[in-house]
């Protein structure tokens, strides 16, 4: 009788990324494949050119918006919590809490239950469905912030710091970098939740995704797309833009004494803020921090952990110290959306 070996009974690691032989599909593949299951719409996970894509409806809409109508030869949508048989495997998508439409994928095959997390967070986000722990034998997790130093503060605290700065410097435009998919919309919702009752001015690169979120019912504050003539009038206002824009002297020109902010989990590292010239670092992340990563592994009840990317070694060590089988995968081509979507945002910054 063959002994069950865990995640390796269900998944293998190939040059294209994670592959399930029982279902003949890849998850978030790095190159063109026949069958791709996509966890969410960020560009390090959702690439164009696959023959067939399976994803949530919202992720397919995001891919269509960002990559064009012909991002894949064919596509199929799947709802959360609805199992689907693919070959000799069964897959079920569950909310990941990362961005709109983001999903974890439960794979059931060869008598095993393996969950691939994609990117995820456990913190409050009014713009997408919250992360839902799924019991499994093996958990394949990200570790973008997989070091004990990364413990994100409550988002209400960081939004409070932004609004306090507005009161202290009413003569200055507060220009905050936020990535166009997920982070910018979450900021708009959190600002509204904090009681901001005026429009937030947004860069053109954020407009289409923001309108998609709004059409999906996200509780965003009112927004105004910035025109060049508006900039001189924006003292005392909040401006959201792609991070590439806060590094552009040309784009920042004509804002009244711009006070530069940046919303990212990486703002916990003050050296990064200084390198970017950020006066107002806002630690707002769409990834799980160290405590959330550890709690999630425990919540799944798994006996084995694979870590796809990020600070893999520290999380693997933590898991092994608790008696779990664990290994790093060192998958290439993945990273925090703050880095992966920079090219996408930079392309749009000229608008």
Image (tube, grey):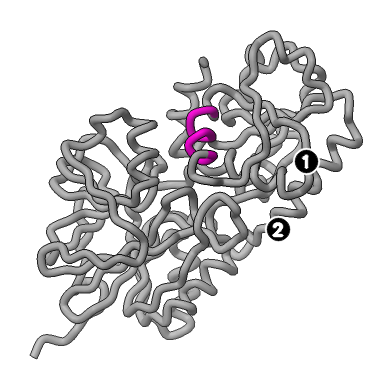
Q: Quadrant of residue 171?
A: top right
In the image as oriented, which residue stretches furthest toward the top?
229
Residue 6 percent location from the top left of the image = 25, 78
Numbered label attached to residue 248: none
Residue 311 visible from this viewpoint: no
Q: Position of residue 17 (x, y in %)?
A: 25, 52
Picture quarter with the N terminus: bottom left
The structure residue drawn at horizontal position 65% and vertical position 30%, both measured from the top left corner, is: 223
Tell me the crowding category of disc 1: few under 14, some 14 to 19, or many 20 or more residues within 10 angstroms, Cα based.
Answer: some
User: What residue is drawn where x is 59% and y is 31%?
Assistant: 243
302 w.r.t. 292: above or below: below
306 falls in the magenta region: no
Report the side of 232 relative to 46 (left or right).
Answer: right
Depth order, front residue of 188/140: 188
- Which label's residue is closer to the chain start, 1 or 2? 2
Residue situated furthest bottom in the rendering:
1
Q: Is residue 123 left or right of residue 30?
A: right
User: Range of the magenta residues?
Assistant: 207-214
Count of labels in the image: 2
Residue 196 is marked as: 1
Residue drawn at (39%, 46%), measured in percent from left and top? Answer: 58
Percent across and percent down for residue 130 are: 52, 61
Magenta residues, dominant SS class? helix
Give the residue furthest to the left: 1
Residue, x 36% and y 39% (percent of image)? 61
Task: Identify which residue, 188 or 215, lies in the foreground.
Answer: 215
Question: What element does badge 1 sit on?
Answer: loop
Element under disc 2: loop
Residue behind mark 2: 153
């Amino acid at each position: 009788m063959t002994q069950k070996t865990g995640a390796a009974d269900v998944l293998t690691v190939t040059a294209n990324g994670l592959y399930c032989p029982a279902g003949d599909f890849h998850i978030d593949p790095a190159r063109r494949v026949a069958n791709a299951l996509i966890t969410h719409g960020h560009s390090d996970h959702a690439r164009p050119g696959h023959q067939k894509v399976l994803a949530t409806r919202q992720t397919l809409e995001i891919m269509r918006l960002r990559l064009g109508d012909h991002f894949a030869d064919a596509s199929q949508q799947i709802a959360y919590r609805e199992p689907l048989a693919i070959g000799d495997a069964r897959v079920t998508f569950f909310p990941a809490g990362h961005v709109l439409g983001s999903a974890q994928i439960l794979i059931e095959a060869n008598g095993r239950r393996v969950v691939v997390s994609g990117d995820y967070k456990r913190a409050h986000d009014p713009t997408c469905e919250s992360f839902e722990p799924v019991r499994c034998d093996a958990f394949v997790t990200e570790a973008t912030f997989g070091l004990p130093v990364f413990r994100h503060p409550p988002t209400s605290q960081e939004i409070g710091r932004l609004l306090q700065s507005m009161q202290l410097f009413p003569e200055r435009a507060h220009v905050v970098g936020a990535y166009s998919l997920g982070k910018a919309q979450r900021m708009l919702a959190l600002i509204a939740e904090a009681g901001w009752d005026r429009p937030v001015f947004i860069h053109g690169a954020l407009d289409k995704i923001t309108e998609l979120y709004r059409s999906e019912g996200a509780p965003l504050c009112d927004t105004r797309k910035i025109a060049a003539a508006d900039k001189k009038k924006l003292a005392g206002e909040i401006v959201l833009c792609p991070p590439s824009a806060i590094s552009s002297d040309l784009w920042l020109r004509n804002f009244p004494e711009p006070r530069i902010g940046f919303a990212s989990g990486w703002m916990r590292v003050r050296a990064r803020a200084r390198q970017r010239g950020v006066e107002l670092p806002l630690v707002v992340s769409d990834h799980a921090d160290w405590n959330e990563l550890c709690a999630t592994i425990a919540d799944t009840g798994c006996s084995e952990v694979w870590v796809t990317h990020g600070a893999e070694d520290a999380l693997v060590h933590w898991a092994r110290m608790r008696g779990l089988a664990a290994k790093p995968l060192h998958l290439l081509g993945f990273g925090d959306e703050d880095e992966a979507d920079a090219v996408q945002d930079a392309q749009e910054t000229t608008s």
